[in-house]
Amino acid sequence: MATNGHTNGNGHTNGHNSNGHANGNGHTALAEPPHYALLKEKIVILKQERQAVILAHNYQEGAIQDVADFVGDSLGLARKAQATDAKVILFCGVHFMAETAAMLCPEKTVLIPDLAAGCSLADMIIPEQIKTWRAKHPDGVVVCYVNTSAAVKAECDYCVTSTNGVKVIEHIPADKEILFVPDYYLGSYLKAKTKRKIHLWKGYCPAHAAILPEQVDRLREQHAEAKFLMHPECGCTTKQMHLADEVLSTEGMVQYINRSPAKEFIIATENGLLHRLRTQHPEKQFYPASEHASCHHMQRNTLEKAFMSLVRMEHVVTVDPAIAERALIPIQRMLDIA
Ligand code: 13P
């Protein structure tokens, strides 16, 4: 188990501060409830009994990241799910991520701590809307963000994550027009980067929408030396996109910070990522672009629910095989490209 500065199986150093003392980067870590230490020990034992692996998204609460075998972004998690030989995957993330793992690993049992951990962005498009849109652009290629249901993916040609979107779009023949769903801001970013004809669906992530340009301006004035890192789900059409030092996925931010000599960073994404950043780099300062950038769906998963998932072997995530067969086509195309 990863506690108090020990390194877990992924090479992440998890320096969570169970006493609530200030850590090296000047932030006071919230004290974890006293029973968490015991819960973490029980989870490690249960994980072995169940032959399970715990995969956690970068936005999950710190305690879950601490017990995970792998913490990463949506692309990294999909690849880890595919590669593991564990019988059970406890997927600590949101439903579309667990669905992707279930489709990629039909012989494994995929569990999610809370079945209601959905994604507001993914809910902004349904399969019928894709069919109608496609009918208006019969030669269009439909590209979906991974933040979509399996049923939506089944109607699409290519899937992308925020890590590989540019590469996937560049792979599509240049004369094709592209219909991009559901995130307007990631789509705008891909359009600007690739200069392709991309029609945009007007979906958005509420957690990223909470990051306001005025707040970012203020932070940049206060911390003139800080690097400004922005997730492409942020409002890229605002002037911040051009001011960002880098536009990166969550894992892209982690890697950038690992390499960077800079000491201060303004982080424009969901604030769950800060746990991993502060744990790995206690010597650096991280300023959230907004205190309100938090995803209530991600937070539905708690350490208690992760524990109960392994005790009761619930909640099993499955996808109708007929849908999975079609949804795997855009997913596999993406994995083959990048
Ligand atoms: P990443 O792929 O950068 O982890 O982002 C996933 C996501 O769901 C953001 O809302």
Image (tube, grey):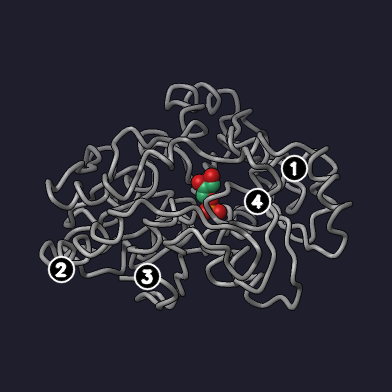
Which residue is drawn at the image coordinates 17% and 52% (left, top)? Answer: 310
Q: Earlier in the sequence, mark 1 or mark 3?
A: 3
Alpha carbon separation for disc pair 4 and 2: 35 Å
Res 299 → quadrant: top left
Amino acid type, residue under disc 3 in the picture: Thr
Amino acid type, residue under disc 2 in the picture: Gln
Q: Earlier in the sequence, mark 4 or mark 2?
A: 2
Q: Is mark 4 within 8 Å of ligand 1?
A: yes
Which residue in the structure is indicated by mark 3? 3
Q: Is residue 152 above or below residue 336?
A: above
Amino acid type, residue under disc 1 in the picture: Cys
- Residue closer to the observer: 194 or 54: 54
- Mark 4 crowdedness (10 Å alpha carbons): few <14, some 14-19, many ≥20: many
Which of discs 4 and 2 lies nearer the camera? The answer is 2
Dot 3 falls on a residue whose secondary structure is loop
Dot 1 falls on a residue whose secondary structure is loop
